[in-house]
Image (spheres, rainbow, N blue to C red):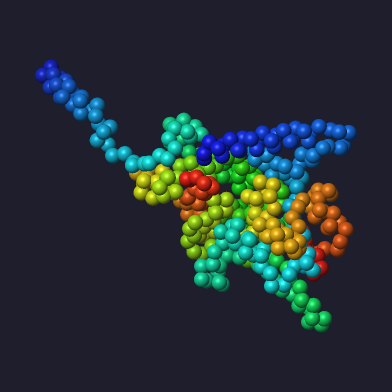
Amino acid sequence: MSLRGLLRFAACLALALPALAFASGRTPKPDIIIANPGHCVEPTEIMRRNHPQMLLHQRDLTVHEGIRTTKYSLKNCVQCHASKTTGSVLGEKGFCQSCHAYAGVKLDCFECHASKAKLVAGGTP
Amino acid sequence: MSAEANEGLSRRGFLAISAAALGGVMLAPGIRLIEIAAARAPDQPASKQVRWGLLIDTNKCEPGCDDCVTACATENGIKQTGHPRTDSQWIRKVELKDMRSGRVHSAPVMCQHCAEPPCVEVCPTGASFKRADGIVLVDRHICIGCRYCMMACPYKARSFVAQELTDQNPDVPRGKGCVEGCTLCVHRVDRDEQPACVEACTKAGHNAMIFGDLNDPQSEIAQRVAKYASTQIRADLRLDPGVHYQGL
């Protein structure tokens, strides 16, 4: 590449930098309402990547061996993450559905499992 | 989960642990304050030492009463969909009449939780299985809905869910495309509670159903099975059902 071409490239890069810095703002993100932020069973990054494996592991332990620890149970996920308005993890801004719709990943847990939190006496879900 | 509920859980967990620790203290060789085997911690798998079973006394079972069926439907979220021929039926009341003497008696019939379950034997995917403590279940994650188990079961104890379902009980996931049957209320048993049908029968004052560990000689069910004549339905098939009937 000639020196002139290199200079032109550097100039373009310098012009583009501010736009790149704000690139994240232009990317559409899932519109989620998080009912109880910051209190999940593992750090957010681990949860985002590994929640399917956690649920898969727990489901086999629970169904086949009867181990019913609550830490990774789907019931507890729903209980905590259900929307305070709809009481569900599904729906347009629901915790599970909004992100799964954004990522284009099929969400079939709730064809069988309850998607709504069980109402605790005297409290919101 | 709210902070309160968390606190409640941990307190209960602590009590359970301390009870287990206390119970473990031997008063004299072979004598314990509390049998540790009675309560299972949530992180412990179902034990092979246990064989859950039911004893149903048909002399005490009231003809016409269907409290056990109603309690089962409420507990497990079984609703009528307007298709009675294909609706799920985990438990049903059967009325028997001796034509010679005219004696009428009735009994609930549900999954008999066989020791040698034919539904498990025929299942092509391994979805139909027997838990270590003798409860026969369907793993709906693996079930493909082929209904081979329904054909294999001599008790007609299983149903196929043909309709989409909503508003399931959080403890009892159910859905279209899977075979299902009585779970002996496994979610309650794991919490040291009795199945819903047994609780309803006791509440109605009939006391026709007893739930317990057939392997534990101290349990009421094992003592009654040892003392009184009881039969298993189609005992000739030698499937060794966990549900025993008295007075049939």
Give the residue furthest to the front: A122
Q: Where is residue A51 in the image (x, y as percent from the top left)?
A: 48, 38
Q: Position of residue B30 (x, y in %)?
A: 87, 37
Depth check, front residue: B196 or A45: B196
Seen at 72% across and 72% down, the residue is B63
Is B68 above or below relative to B191?
Answer: below
Seen at 60% across and 38% down, the residue is B8
Is B183 above or below relative to A93?
Answer: below
Q: Where is residue A53 in the image (x, y as percent from the top left)?
A: 50, 39
Depth check, front residue: A40 or B179: A40
The total number of labels drawn is: 0
Side of B54 where A98 appears, left or right: left
Side of B212 where B88 appears, left or right: left
- Residue B229, by quadrant, is bottom right
Depth check, front residue: B132 or B62: B62
Give the residue furthest to the left: A4
Q: Where is residue B96 in the image (x, y as percent from the top left)?
A: 74, 75
Seen at 56% across and 59% down, the residue is B77
Give the residue furthest to the top: A3
Depth check, front residue: B224 or B7: B7
Answer yes or no: is residue B12 visible. yes
Seen at 76% across and 57% down, the residue is B210
Answer yes or no: is residue B149 visible. no
